[in-house]
Amino acid sequence: MTDLPKTYDFHATEKRLYQWWEERGYFKPRSDPKHPDFDPSVEPFVISIPPPNVTGELHLGHAMFVSMEDLMIRYHRMKGYSALWVPGSDHAGIATQLQVEKMLVNEGTSREALGREEFERRTWEWKRKYGGIIQQQIRRLGASCDWERERFTLDPGLSRAVREAFVRLYEKGLIYRGPRMINWSPGLKTAVSDLEVEYSQEPGFLYHFKYMLEGSDEYIPVATTRPETILGDSAVAVHPEDERYRKFVGRTVIVPILGRKVPVIADDYVDREFGTGALKITPAHDPNDYNIGQRHNLEFINMLDDSAIVNENGGPYQGLTREEARRRLWADMKAAGLTIKEEPYQLNVPRSQRGGEIIEPRISTQWFVRIQPLAEAALQAVRNGQIKIVPERFTKVYYNWLENIEDWCISRQLWWGHRIPVWYCGNCHQQVVAREDPSACPRCGSYDLKQDEDVLDTWFSSGLWPFSTLGWPEQTPDLQYFYPTSIMETGYDILFFWVARMIMMGLEFTGEAPFHTVYLHGLIRDENGQKMSKTKGNVIDPLQVMDELGTDALRFSVLVGSAPGNDMNLSVKKVEANRNFANKVWNAGRFILGTLDSIQFSEPDSGDTAQWTLADSWVWGRLQALLRDVERLFAVHQYGEAGRQIYEFFWSEFADWYVEIAKQQIAEGGARARLTAETLVRVLDGCLRLLHPFTPFITEELWGHLRDAALTRGLRPISGTDWSEALIIASWPEGQPEEGWEEQKIADFGLVQDIVRAIRNLRAERKVTPGKRIAALIAAGDRLPVLEAQRRTIASLAFLDPQQLTLSERLAEIPQGAVSLVVSGVELYLPLAGLVDTSAERERLQAELNDIAGQVSRLEGLLSSPFAQKAPAAVVEKERQKLATFQETVAKLKAQLESLGS
RNA sequence: GGGCGGUUAGCUCAGUUGGUUAGAGCGUUGCGUUGACAUCGCAAAGGUCGUAGGUUCGAGUCCUAUACCGCCCACCA
């Protein structure tokens, strides 16, 4: 036992335990449909992991969700649920393709040079090589996933699910293809969805220029932030009631430089207050202009190619980039006297979430999901409580998004992903949508079939994740038993991207909400609340932190210290503090195990029995309260607060007080020592069980030793549990009332603590070192019996000489030359010869008296106010008792003051 | 433009059925190392809980307004 190292060696332990857990099959659900003794009556608890990108490297965001989900899984596993955590990863279309393309460029080749097939082959190769890294890193965090159920979004099974989903939506008329205004990423040469566009505030200009009226010197002043789009203009719009321009409506204006003739139209959309009050209309390159163009039946002039280079419609500017075209066009207009002014202006630039390049709104033929019906169902599921979002405030955000949702552009012009299951017949031009690759055209029998070139948005397959990973569309035993899943735990930043889409898809395809609870955690920022980024250099690498401080310390740090949905500022210092906590747990355990060695447990029955001491009762009562609180907090997903309370109890109550007292009780030997040892074991056992979901490694390691030591000595674990073969599968401790325990014990022990603290305090003030045993006189009044029983405890904790600790009901006279104090009505006297300065004493006592007297008058005021009538009786009674104690204290302090003379 | 969050000790943050002297970690100060732990112990200093109203016997906690910081959605050229 005592061979436990002084400092916990997390490196070796973490590796060994993880391997052991996995080998022993502890990560598998208790009741498993794939196992012969499957018992469907055991309630499942299931989490689908938010699949990290195969390209991913572990960052704190992963550490956050892995820790949180592992906590939930471990807790429910201990509660007896059949806990399943399904791991996996996401093919991450754009991200992965970019990575592989980068690699190809380094090799001196390119995706285009290789061709589609070869590129896909290389990407798979890349995935096999690097795709496992993130999973290994997730293991290091202690994730208790069922790795045999690991999935990848491009696996055959999941790909089948994607096809099934696509075909079903298509057949229902919820998927359509057509030209629409979409967000075009010119660098990647693909469409992206609205969500993949981020807007950034950037300085720029508002350019004012003249739209000359045909055959006239008059002009309409127009303002734009993107002059190059003039090349695609097909109208100028004004507000129908705008006096300035009304006369021009219906006339024709000349597009600068190009000389194209376009109409002046009237539309309510135009804001008379903004800019010049006249708006140039580029229906093919602006979403609002697109709508206006449709209303007025305007020409849609596309002036950019796939790479956002000006095309043949740009006349002399053909071949230029957007930026060059803008500069040149403006210069030419200036030369032609068509410009008015450039005004500095704050732009809202749409940029790609991936590459950061400027997104170009563009008309393009793409595949869309008609989202309204799906969104309606998804709204209902939350509105009617089928799905609960935690913290609740995000429900409103969710509603707001779904109520204003636009059709979802699901096609991407990429090569890495699920190819759209649509074929076009070269002969009869039939469009074939099929679950299985067709070999011939079902209408004309032609073999001239070509599959649609596009792949699906990555989030399309992610949306199926909770059920596709369980085997859908097959009605597998896994799907039947584990679906719907329990909690979807993820960051609030992907509420729309992922969570909402899973809800829509889940309801559509399975008829059920894919989970009953959405728990959203916050984002991790640096210690100053800044977003971590490589360029800022403020990134904390979880792998490095785990190397230096241990996985448990990192986990505890991300799990404790912030409220659900709130961002968390993390610093290495915080992790260090939690490493210290882990070390505290380790050493307390080490001490307790060492203690067991020193006690003789197999004494012949001598009739020697012991009852619980006050300290025993107290620690037990506090532990029970903790168990109840943790249970309550877990039920409302307040994991951080629960962790904090366990930490507090362990360190400030169990280690600081009970373990210290236990040392002395054990020194008494015999039955007292045995009972104390058992209490130590049982409380430690309870704490380790509570801590296990937070800090799985150190608790498992310590608990293993504890269990062995307890079993050989016949010591019980905490009530309602057994010593199982591993903590990870041990049962969760339930709070249980214990025979002979009463609430009063807590208060009685509190008095002991107050007295001990007061003595320590006085000693510290008088610079009496702990090594020096001193005398004390205590006049305890009616608390004498309680304190008399605690004589040794008080003496030992306050470093008093037990021979010179005098306890009495009251003193005949107040001792002279002693430092004195009154604590909760109990008088304390420390005869500190030579250290007593009468005037200083008087000052100190007077200050104390003033303080308490202030409390007395405050409480007197309170109790004579309406409070006494209106507040609940128990609350009032509590205050009455406090007042009584304060009054008693005041009287005694006064007496002490008087005895000092004047 | 709409919505959400934050504002509590020097710093980073807890504080969820409103109960009457507001907590932690880190930092600071003093004392302390003969066996659980210096990754430690014992103490101390430090807060009118952003501001102003309101509800209530009672508000950090509920309501209203407001300031500042941050975020999300929308995308008026």
Image (cartoon, rainbow, N blue to C red):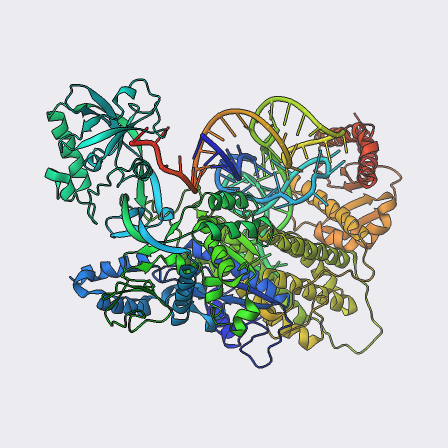
The quadrant of the rendering that contains the N terminus of chain A is: bottom right
Asked whether A103 or A277 is in front, the reply is: A277
Left or right: residue A522 compared with residue A216: right
Asked whether A420 or A816 is in front, the reply is: A420
Left or right: residue A385 compared with residue A795: left
Marks counted in the figure total 0
Q: Is residue A883 at least partly visible in the picture?
A: yes
Q: Is residue A571 at least partly visible in the picture?
A: no
Left or right: residue A318 compared with residue A404: left
Q: Quadrant of residue A635?
A: bottom right
Measuring 41% from the left and 68% from the top, which residue is drawn there? A158
The quadrant of the rendering that contains the C terminus of chain A is: top right
Rendered location of residue A672, percent (x, y): 77, 66
From this view, report whether residue A105 is shown above or below residue A20: above
From this view, report whether residue A724 is shown above or below residue A401: below
From this view, report whether residue A122 is shown above or below residue A294: below
Q: Quadrant of residue B47?
A: top right
Rendered location of residue A317, percent (x, y): 12, 39
Rendered location of residue A65, percent (x, y): 48, 56
Rendered location of residue B34, percent (x, y): 60, 59
Toward the bottom, the furthest residue is A36
Measuring 62% from the left and 73% from the top, which residue is drawn there? A40
Left or right: residue A770 compared with residue A294: right
